[in-house]
């Protein structure tokens, strides 16, 4: 009798679990359909983001051919071409990487990485970008790790890419003050990269949607589609793909701190 009662109770419980799973899948499907419907609008906005630097490259290249261009103008036009070229290259690279991450075709080449050399290369590039973006008044501090945290087994190119994306964002949204990178040993098995700036910061709503392709307000019917930055989302996905974590802490008007945690081996 007791056995029959248990069997009778088990069937409704299983049905409830099944129904919960069905409801969850239906919700995920509805979100996918909604995102698919939004995607043409997103691509339209993205094409504008591609055309903007491309038009700048074409326009300033044409100005350089003018016979009455002064030396100062030539320097300015060259800088604008370089800046726009970098933006275009970064955007296309992020699109390709995001596609690889989404389709599972991205591969990693893990090997020992000597962090002081990587940080030195990053510092050289960021000092160059300071000049290109007229941010030479900012203080950049890239602190090399001590001997205890100088080595990590990871994909060198992808680690560099994540750190550069985070640095680019800090450089873009910091008008005064400093940007500082430090590397520490979180524990015996993980290395922490902490990037802190004194920039504009983000409000709670922006922070909550930071790693999403579409923000929640864009999901509402009738709302205008806006493109979202792909770079930080790519960095977040790459960190996860490397068995790590990328966290962002920020307050509007009080700067931003990015914490990248990766396994040492």
Image (cartoon, rainbow, N blue to C red):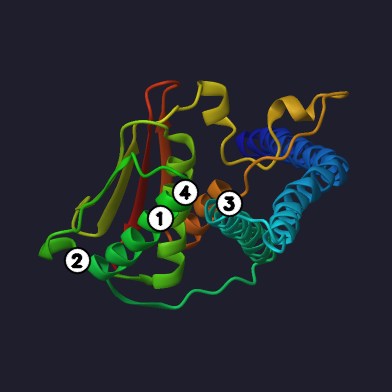
Instruction: Identify the residue position indicated by label 3 in the image.
Output: 73
Residue 203 higher or lower than 191, as above or below: above
Circle count: 4
Gap in Å between the C-alphas at discs 3 and 2?
44 Å
Instruction: Identify the residue position indicated by label 1 in the image.
Output: 163
Gap in Å between the C-alphas at discs 4 and 2?
23 Å
Res. 95 image quadrant: bottom right
Closer to the camera: disc 1 or disc 4? 4
Q: Secondary structure at mark 2?
A: loop
Closer to the camera: disc 3 or disc 1? 3
Instruction: Identify the residue position indicated by label 4 in the image.
Output: 168
Instruction: Look at the image and tell me in which quarter the N terminus lies.
Output: top right
Gap in Å between the C-alphas at discs 3 and 4?
26 Å
Gap in Å between the C-alphas at discs 1 and 4?
9 Å
Q: Are marks 3 and 4 in contact (CB under 8 Å)?
A: no
Q: Secondary structure at mark 4?
A: helix
The earlier-in-sequence mark between 2 and 1 is: 2
Residue at point 38%, 55% (across, down) = 126
Q: Are marks 2 and 1 in contact (CB under 8 Å)?
A: no
Instruction: Identify the residue position indicated by label 2 in the image.
Output: 150
Instruction: Provide residue 105's location: percent of width, then percent of height.
Output: 64, 72
The earlier-in-sequence mark between 1 and 4 is: 1
Instruction: Look at the image and tell me in which quarter the C terminus lies.
Output: bottom left
Instruction: Provide residue 132's location: percent of width, then percent of height.
Output: 48, 52
Closer to the camera: disc 3 or disc 4? 3
Closer to the camera: disc 3 or disc 2? 3
Residue at point 40%, 55% (across, down) = 163
Gap in Å between the C-alphas at discs 2 and 1?
16 Å
């Amino acid at each position: 009798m007791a056995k029959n009662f248990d069997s009778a109770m088990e069937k409704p419980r299983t049905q409830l679990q099944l129904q919960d799973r069905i409801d969850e899948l239906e919700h995920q499907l509805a979100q996918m359909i909604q995102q698919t419907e939004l995607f043409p609008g997103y691509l339209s906005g993205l094409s504008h983001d591609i055309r903007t630097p491309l038009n700048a490259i074409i326009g300033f290249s044409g100005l350089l051919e003018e016979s009455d261009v002064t030396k100062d103008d030539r320097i300015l036009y060259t800088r604008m071409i370089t800046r726009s070229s970098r933006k275009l290259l970064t955007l296309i690279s992020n699109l390709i990487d995001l596609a690889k991450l989404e389709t599972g075709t991205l591969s990693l080449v893990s090997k020992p990485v000597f962090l002081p050399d990587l940080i030195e290369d990053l510092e050289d590039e960021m000092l160059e970008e300071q000049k290109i973006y007229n941010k030479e008044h900012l203080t950049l501090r890239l602190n090399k790790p001590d001997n205890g945290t100088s080595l990590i087994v990871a994909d060198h190119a992808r680690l560099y890419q994540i750190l550069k994306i985070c640095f680019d964002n800090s450089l873009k949204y910091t008008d005064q003050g400093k940007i500082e990178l430090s590397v520490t040993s979180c524990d015996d098995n993980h290395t922490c990269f902490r990037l802190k700036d004194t920039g504009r910061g983000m409000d709670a709503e922006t922070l909550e949607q930071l790693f999403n392709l579409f923000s929640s307000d864009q999901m509402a019917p009738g709302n205008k589609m806006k493109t979202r930055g792909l770079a930080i989302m790519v960095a977040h996905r790459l960190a996860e793909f490397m068995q790590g974590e990328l966290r962002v802490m920020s307050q509007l008007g009080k700067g931003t701190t990015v914490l990248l945690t990766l396994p040492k081996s």
